[in-house]
Amino acid sequence: MAVVAMATTSVGLGIGVTPASAHALLTSTDPQGGAALATPPTRVVLSFSESIRVSGDSIRVLDRAGNRVDLGHAQGGARASQAMVVLRAGLPVGTYVASWRVISADSHPVSGAFAFGVGGPPDAGAARAEGTTSGSAVVGFLFGAARFAGYVGVGVLLGACLFLVLLWPAGLRAAGSGRLLAAAWGLAVAASAAQLLLQGLYTSGSGLGGIVHWSHLSTTLDERFGHLLLIRLLALMLAAPLLRQAARMGRPDLWRRGELAALGLAVAVSLAAIGHGGVGDLVGLSVVSLTVHVLAMSVWIGGLAVIVVLLRTASAAEIGAVLPRWSRLAIGAVVAIVVSGLVQSWREIGSFAAVIDTGYGRMVLYKVWFVLGMLGVAALARQWVRRHYGSARVHPVGAAAGIEATGPDATSNAGPDAGAEGGVDGGPGRLGGLPGAAALAGLRRGIVAELALAGVVLGLTATLVNMVPARTSYAPPFHGSAFAGPMTVKVRIAPTRIGAESIDVYAYAPTGKPQRLVAAQAQLSLPARSLGPFTVPLDLAETGHVRSDDLQVPLSGSWQLRLSLRLNDFDEYATTLVYTVR
């Protein structure tokens, strides 16, 4: 189980560090990619599907020799979702490549390139060399690892604190609990600091050596991403003395418990508001549901981690006083996880078809699969608890050992061997009918398996944060057919969303065989907005098949596609189809 957890998490981290997987999508460019311009443009304008952050070097325009022809100092456009840069006057005839790298609203970088020509079409493949600026793989991997470590640290810390304060106060003074809290706190702080240092490198595409430059950190500190990380670090620092005091003196008083609760909520909100949860529609609902999701998952994972300590250090009677109450709390956490997960899935996916047809949706299914695995193991553990402690009476023996068997303040001054005269090994003198060492060892193995599955779930969560939500990326291909004279025409357009699209047209003769074409072109128009028609040349791919990757659709709506197909010098036929752009 541990090997499966590490392998799956490693795959998740590897997938999750690709800077190209982000929320903002390029919807249009001016000039268009592949355009043949009669006169040189004065500027390059990029439009995206959401608001973006633009730096001075976000857009570079190069000539065929690799020399820059822009004036630098890229800036935002007329809308928050636009970026632009001014070009030098009087560009000569030739091919030009515009490469870009901007930061989407969810803090992820997006990059790419396109080519245009002055006095003729651009050279084929001119933009490919500039379009692969994906940034440093080392920085991407370290940033993904820091994100994963942050989830683990925060989850264990919040859940362990809740478990120890409410269910097992005596455990606060146990050495194992102290080490667990210290390790989780240190991991959360280190991961947050690492993300703060790496975010600037990650978004700019710089290598690890750039970490010494203040400009990268300064940029991060000016963004919402940096503000949320600083809030998290401050809350963790303020919680440190409270946790130390609790480890020395036991359960804190009501005021200090309130302080810990407020600081824990701040940490959870800072985690929920970073990434997809803090952008798009219904941001308030999203942050609330994600905060509930973070807290509920923390209760589950952190509680499991403390139970490992509980099973190793506490007496059988003390275990019997804590586990039933934990079992009831865990049920509430599972309900909160399911409800908040459904809310977020609806917001990020939007339709059942998108679950299967997008990478984001399929990754959510993987996450659900492993959560179901955790639920299966948890159900077995709950049955174990009910079987061994459902009818057990630990109060008489627990009282003799200094244990209060009921109420949230159940404590014990006895060690693992308390009540040894009655036996804790399942022998004839077993303590009040409680399970022995062998049975507890079986429960411990189940808890470890559940924690391993939790590691996989957190790894997949770290991957999902860096993927394009299905609601944004889902655009099912359009398939249509029509008649053009004697021919049957079949059309496929993908994806059907704003921005670049590809079109494939297949023409068949009345005999059913591919019809030979000598020329073809398409015209796009949007009657509802009085746009078009825009002419799109179609290239001959093979007999009866023409295609183009140069469609640029700037708006959503019902677009009309008019196809003109020429068989020879005398015969040309046309047909019209309508398809919807999301």
Image (cartoon, helix red, strand yellow):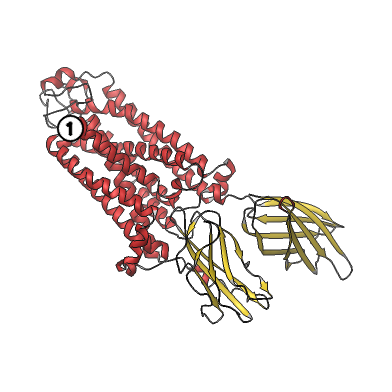
Q: Single out the residue that lies furthest toward the right.
A: 570
Instruction: Check disc 1: other Cα within 10 Å, few if <14, some if 14-19, many if 20+.
Output: many
Left or right: where 515 falls relative to 91: right
Residue that carries the numbered disc 1 in the rendered image? 251
Q: Quadrant of residue 44?
A: bottom right
Q: Is residue 425 visible?
A: no
Residue 210 higher or lower than 292, as above or below: below
Which residue occupies 56% across, 51% down?
A: 473
Residue 212 higher or lower than 553, as above or below: below
Left or right: where 13 falls relative to 61: left
Residue 242 higher or lower than 561, as above or below: above
In terms of secondary structure, where does tag 1 sit? loop
Which residue occupies 42% across, 48% down?
A: 460
Q: Is residue 480 visible?
A: yes
Which residue occupies 11% across, 24% down?
A: 402
**Mark 1: amino acid:** Arg
Q: Quadrant of residue 203?
A: bottom left
Left or right: where 173 falls relative to 514: left
Image x and y of residue 454, in percent: 35, 43
Left or right: where 169 falls relative to 10: left
